[in-house]
Amino acid sequence: MNMEPRGMETHAETEIAELFDKLHQDLPGATDVSRSREAAFAAFRQNGLPHRRVEDWKYSDLRNRLKSVPGFAARRDDTAAAAILAAAGDVYGAVDRYRLVIVDGQFHAGLSDLTALAAEGAVVRPLAEALADEGAELFEVPEIAADNAAVGLNAIFCADGLVLTIADKARLSKPVEIVHALSGDAPVSTAERVVVKAGAGSEVTLLETFVGGTEGSFANSVSDFRVASGAKLVAARLQTEAAGTTHVGTALVTQAEDSAVKLIGAGIGAGFARHQSFVRFAGENARADLLGITMVRGGQHVDQTLVVDHAVPHCDSRELFKTVVDDDAKGVFQGKIIVRPHAQKTDGQMMTQSLLLSEHADMALKPELEIFADDVQCAHGATSGQIDEDLLFYLRARGIPEAEARTLLVLAFLSEAVEEIGDEVVVEAFEERIRSWLSAKE
């Protein structure tokens, strides 16, 4: 199964090839799934890990970051998985929600609320099981993500995850949390995939949380949201993994006519993290709101990258991303709106704003528009600056201590994106994470 690589390869690239040689015969799925894995592996052998000379990865050199790739963890029993989950902590302790649990890339039905979800019209299956029935259809991705290196790497190794199917017109009474927990006792690699099929006219709020991990862990997740006509989906993603972890997460969104999606991402953890979103409008009169907050310090590197594909007419998109960078950390925002030739009456608006809390903080901004239609309203903007000293003085003059005043100003800066979540309890959970991040500096 070992294919010839291109030229010189790194130690990590050699380890990835060796892992696939070792594991590929035992990975789940029928013949068509195996073919998809082999095609993705062939592309990897040709191109290797993405690096700074690849335009989409110029600010986030994954090849340079990964010096070594740990093995994939063996499946834990529910008792051991529950212990890992408890050690990682509960981000949404006060939120009444259903929970689906993935530990070290493996779905744990025994720790998940399957019966209660089924009663509301939401059926959950382990991805490993679904791959045998639905095959490579579960690996299909929008054209704009087809050549993405991280998505391909996930297809090579993805062994489990879950498929959440929400019935037509089902309206779930509580949010659904999909928690991805990494063990902290030793570094591991994971490659799970979550596929959400939101039926016509359905409504659901999803909370994806990424917790745990340790120095040297490498997490590669894909969340594939397939939103049918008239459906409404809110997906809030909170990444708080351990500082030494390398995290690459991908959200794939395909929207049918009259659907509405709100995708909120918060990147706080990991030493090196990239969250990329690919949104494709496949039906008219749909709307997507993409929002993100990033908070980094120390030597952290967090990248928010998105591509929005207006492939049909009469669709709206709004993108608002806020980044706070402290110490010598680096934040990255890359955003692209594509308007296809026949996508008339498109309305796409993108804004990214960054707040630099130290002289050594680094922020890379790259908003783009690719417009091939003439009857559209599209714009992008980018700002970067420091805390307003006049506002800080105003608060301190009214007796507010400097640390608290700075916290209030940062919260105010991020609140525009956070409050778009809509659910007050979930908003409070996000804001509490922001306060914890700020207080850790004091």
Image (cartoon, helix red, strand yellow):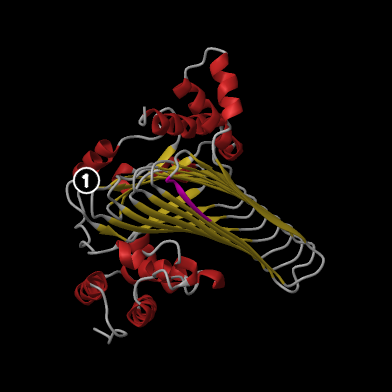
**Does the magenta-highlighted stretch encompass residue 225?**
no
Which range of residues does the magenta coloring cover?
360-364
**Does the magenta-highlighted stretch encompass residue 361?**
yes
Q: Amino acid at mark 1?
A: Gly
Instruction: Tell me if residue 35 comes above or below residue 186 in the rendering.
Output: below
Provide the residue designation for mark 1: 184
Instruction: Tell me if residue 397 comes above or below residue 143 in the rendering.
Output: above
Q: Quadrant of the C terminus?
A: top left
Which is nearer the eye, 294 or 146?
294
In the image, farthest residue toward the right: 375
Q: Is residue 287 visible?
A: no
- Asked whether, in this view, residue 287 is left or right of residue 56, the answer is right
Give the x, y percent position of residue 435.
44, 29
Which is nearer the eye, 291 or 365?
365
Secondary structure beneath dot 1 equals loop
- Asked whether, in this view, residue 142 is left or right of residue 108, the answer is right
